[in-house]
Amino acid sequence: MPEDLSPATVLRRLERGQSVFIPSSIRHIVFTLIFALVIGVGLLIAFVWIVAATISEGRSWWLVIANLRMWAFVVGIVGCLLVAPIGVALRLRRREALVLSPAGVALARHGRVVPGTLLPWHDMEAVVYERAVSRGPKVLAYILTEEATRRLRGRGLNPRWMVRSGFVLSHRRLHPILAAAHARFSARPYGHR
């Protein structure tokens, strides 16, 4: 039976001092692989067709080799048919998860929190679900405090820290959980600042 990740249940678990793991979505990872493979096969077919047409017209191989568009096809084919499957295999092997705790949000691999990834609730001013760029998709982001921005990202940089996608909960479903947890635990700093 899948774990209940409703906002109320997650908050109850956090208030009891428990951590909540939101794992990576296997379905999302597999769909990414299928999409990359389809694009890669399409690029490969187009590449072969263009090369075959060039040769059948009696043109030189140098026209194919010197054409930058053909090199773009090669890069796309290698990326989609070689690099993407390796990346997907690594993501499946890592079994990453987003970990919510009363102290903050962290990234976990193989069920263990990765050192240095904890972002305390008190380092966030807000959790927002909005368009990062006009006409772009809505994304989930943490708005960092001025002090946290200087410490984590550098002086003068954007305080918006995007939440990675690919978890079992979409950004739309993850937003109410993170916003409620932030509202509940940001006023109570854990540890020292």
Image (tube, helix red, strand yellow):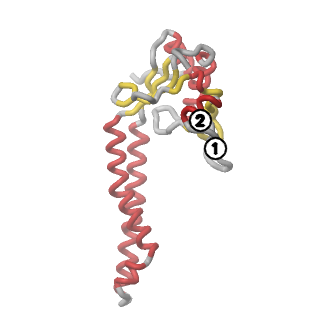
Which of the two residues, 183 or 27, is positioned nearer the viewer here? 183
The answer to whether residue 1 of the structure is visible from this angle is: yes
Question: Is 5 left, or right, of 129 in this rendering?
Answer: left
Location of the N terminus by quadrant is top left
Location of the C terminus by quadrant is top right
| Residue drawn at x 37%, y 56% as measured from the top left | 37
| Residue drawn at x 36%, y 25% as measured from the top left | 112
| Residue drawn at x 35%, y 54% as measured from the top left | 83
| Residue drawn at x 36%, y 40% as measured from the top left | 91
Q: In the rendered view, tell whether residue 156 sits above or below residue 41.
A: above
Which of the two residues, 69 or 45, is positioned nearer the viewer here? 69
Quarter of the image for residue 60 reads bottom left
Looking at the rendered structure, the secondary structure element under dot 2 is: strand
Looking at the rendered structure, the secondary structure element under dot 1 is: loop
Q: Do the residues labelled 1 and 2 touch (CB within 8 Å)?
A: yes
Q: In the rendered view, tell whether residue 103 sits above or below residue 148.
A: above
Residue 2 location (% of width, % of height): 41, 24
Residue 15 location (% of width, % of height): 53, 11
Q: Name, please, the residue furthest toward the right.
A: 134
* Amino acid type of the residue that numbered disc 1 sits on in the rendered structure: Ala
Residue 157 location (% of width, % of height): 62, 41
Marks 1 and 2, Cα distance to the nearest angstrom?
A: 9 Å
* Amino acid type of the residue that numbered disc 2 sits on in the rendered structure: Ala
- The circle on residue 141 is 2
Q: Name, please, the residue furthest toward the bottom.
A: 58
The answer to whether residue 9 of the structure is visible from this angle is: no
Residue 155 location (% of width, % of height): 61, 39
Q: In the rendered view, tell whether residue 68 sits above or below residue 135.
A: below
Which residue carries the number 1 mark?
Answer: 132
Q: Residues within 10 Å of mark 1 (few under 14, many from 20)?
A: some
